[in-house]
Amino acid sequence: MILYLLIFNVLIFSISQHLGVKYIFRNTQFDKYLILTSSTQRTVIVYNMETEKIEYYFTNVGIFPAISYLDKNLLLIIDTVGTKLISLNLKTHEKNLKHLEKKPIFYQRDKDKVYILDTDGNLYGYSFTLHLEYYYKFLSAPNYFYIYKNYPLGLFIWKKEVDLEYKKKLYNFNLITPSFLVEDYVVDTRGGNILYLVNFKNYKTSPYISFVLNWNKKIYFGSMFSNEIYTIKNDKIELWKKLQYTPTNAKVINNKLYILSAPYNKLIVFNSNGNTKEFKTDKYPIDIFSYKNKVFVICAENGVINIF
């Protein structure tokens, strides 16, 4: 019985690692590395999930480093206030800069390129050596973009006259804040709409959608308004689970659904049968990453990693 309790405790309780920097709200992963960015404290950390140690710690980075990406030995940092890209070679310590004409407002990584959208609707694709490898001009100035079927899709928030731009055409589906794309679905987070791009069907649900993902060949999504998880089944929205806590982010890892509740400092894990376990985290868990058999929860407020 004592041995059983010890094993159970190891599974339930996480390891907490303090990173020495606060407010790490935008984070990315490359292979076994986490790239953690604190915009307000102008700090970028490269963390090795295999050794569970910090390998690189950069301070006084740019004016407002919004997000950072790693590709082998090259670290690319987007400074939105400084309107520039910073490329650092981790091995040679060589540093390159690329100044941008307009303020970058949204960014996406796709393999060995980082795509950057500016305030004028210009979409640039840069290599990690800061060579321009792609350019596209939207008709207008979208707030977000995604590459949908090898072509840029622009999303406009709080616009009455237009919601989407695709292949030089503008569309209006009376959405409020179409903010992200998951497979063939455009998600209107504030309005609670999920637009299916294949036939333009609009699924209306609870507002303040925090995540949409594919799990077990079905679409699941969570509402921060109702604290409920829904699924799209047989072309209809069905309630799947009612949570005690506000769902703010989620990810599928090893066929389990991991849900974060940032305001309540909780991690909720569902298996494929719908059974659940709850774990306490440090303050304001914002991201979930995995490497091999470990799960890493990034707690943004105090710069803490919880390892499960």
Image (cartoon, rainbow, N blue to C red):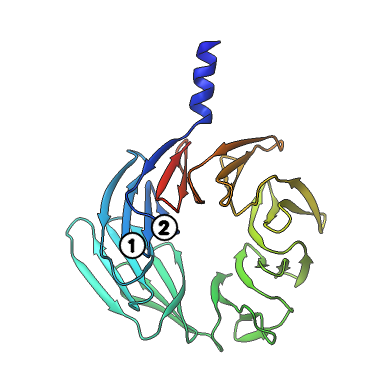
**Which residue in the protein does label 2 denote?**
23
User: As displayed, is residue 166 above or below residue 46?
Assistant: below
Q: Which mark is residue 167?
A: none
Q: Is residue 15 left or right of residue 167?
A: left
For label 1, the SS is: loop
Q: How many marks?
A: 2
Amino acid carrying mark 2 in the image: Tyr
Q: Residue at x 54, y 74 (%)?
A: 145
User: As displayed, is residue 230 above or below residue 169?
Assistant: above
Amino acid carrying mark 1 in the image: Gln
Of residue 34 and residue 254, the one placed in the foreground of this image is 34
**Which residue in the protein does label 1 denote?**
41
Do the numbered discs 1 and 2 sit on residues whose CB atoms are within 8 Å? yes
Q: Residue at x 35, y 70 (%)?
A: 64
- Percent from the top left, x then y, of residue 225? 71, 59
Q: Along the polypeptide, which appears first: circle 1 or circle 2?
A: 2
Q: Is residue 227 left or right of residue 167?
A: right
Q: Is residue 209 left or right of residue 57?
A: right
